[in-house]
Amino acid sequence: MPNGDVVVVRDVLEKISRWLNRFKETGDVIAQYDPAHLSLPWAAFRFLLQTAVSEAQVFGAMAYDLHWLESPFRTVDEEQMHKVSAQEAEVLKLAKLIDTDRLVSLETAVTRLSVQASMYSQSLSDQKYNKIVGWLSASPYYNHHQFVSQSRLPGLGKWLLDHRDYIGWQTSSSSSILLLHGITGSGKTNLCSVIVDWLISNANNDLFGYLYCAKPDFERALHSSDDVMRSILGQLTLDTTGGRKVKDFLCSEYERRIAMAKVDGLDLPKLRTQDCVRLILELAEQDPLTIIIDAIDTLKENERHALISALERIVSEADNVVKILLTSRTSNCTIVAPAANKQVQITNYETQQDMEILVNHLIDTAVTSKLLLEGKVSPVLRSMLIQALLEGAGEMQVSPKDL
């Protein structure tokens, strides 16, 4: 492509074929609700879809053969060709090549229709709902977010929403992991809260979960991969708007584990990381997902490894698009970095506007409260102070609550 991106035509055709097949399956489910009126029109439309799928599969096979004719790895040795083919496929998989934008609208439309036809939730009593909530996670993630978001100054962190790599991650039709990293105090948690606020305002019915791993003043720290994954799973499967609804498959899992615990005479066991991955992948069969985890580097190294492995598995095996954003200190991101498809490093260039907002707030607060020269600061002195503070700050930030 003109911008240097590589598009594998065979992969694109296979993806089109897969989504068309899913569209057919969804249409079959819908047609069963009113066969008298829908059966004949749907049969005609289904025939056209099947024709399109067949053609896409034929063109996919042709593209594969043509690919080998022009491949720099072509060889007359058939056995060697298959070995090279397998290695090339692995390279392409690891490279996470971006799919063409032409599939975005098709994926969105078919996914939404599939969700409406196949995903159901159960309305539960307050008692049972609260038991499931407690079984999954006791982490007050929303309170933590409110604590961070309300402490953030207006306009802070908006640069990230316009950053090229963030936009590429946000708008991509491929599953991927984005790593946001910087030095201690560079504003990673504030930036995470900016993204969560954006998701809350713009995600509509899209499913997303988020978590701040660092310990605030009112919440215990999250020490394990199990803690993090249970909290994320809970957000993705529980209705937190007051409807007391839970996804069917989670209710079934809960009831199955209760029955097993009664038979064995044991307490109800908590879900482990691998259990959460399995259930999230089941949910991803129908819905695209977004997961945001701040300060992943605050977990112990072995727990960090377990969590990164779990997230990598979700990204690689999910039927739908799964986007994951992680934040970490640069000095501690060696474990996270290899798993990330894209990285954004927080530097003083990116945070210049944020620092101007913070410094102006700091000086205005000091002058208004008469902590600085009894409030008698001339415009010239004020400008000098701002310049000195900006030059000395680098990419460091100060939270307004600490001012």
Image (cartoon, grey):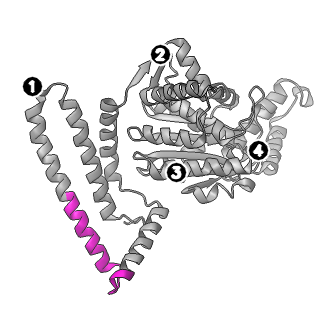
- Closer to the chain start, of discs 4 and 2, is 2
Which residue is tagged 1?
Answer: 36
Q: Secondary structure at mark 1?
A: helix
| Residue sitting at x 67%, y 53% | 349
Q: Which residue is label 2 attached to?
A: 124
- Image position of 188 (left or right of 315): right
Q: Is residue 73 visible?
A: no
Report crowding for label 2: few under 14, some 14 to 19, many 20 or more residues within 10 A (C-alpha): some
The question of residue 61 being in magenta is answered with yes
Q: Locate the C terminus and report the quarter of the image it occupies.
A: top right
Q: Amino acid at mark 1?
A: Ala
Q: Tell me which numbered mark, 3 or 1, is placed earlier along the sequence.
A: 1
**Of the image marks 3 and 4, the number of the one nearer the N terminus:** 4
Q: Amino acid at mark 4?
A: Gly
Q: Nearer the viewer, residue 327 or 116?
A: 116
Q: Is residue 270 left or right of residue 301?
A: left
Instruction: Determine which quarter of the picture holds residue 22.
Output: top left
Q: Is residue 316 magenta?
A: no
Q: Residues within 10 Å of mark 1 (few under 14, many from 20)?
A: few
The residue labelled by disc 4 is: 185
Identify the residue position indicated by label 3 in the image: 313
370 to 393, vertically: above or below: above
Q: Position of residue 379 (x, y in %)?
A: 80, 36
Alpha carbons under labels 3 and 4: distance apart: 31 Å
Relative to 79, say whether 106 is above or below. Answer: above
Extreme residue toward the right, this view: 373
Dot 3 falls on a residue whose secondary structure is helix
Q: What range is drawn magenta here?
A: 56-80
Give the Cα distance between marks 4 and 2: 43 Å
- Residue at 47% in and 40% down: 289
Quadrant containing the N terminus in the rendered view: bottom left
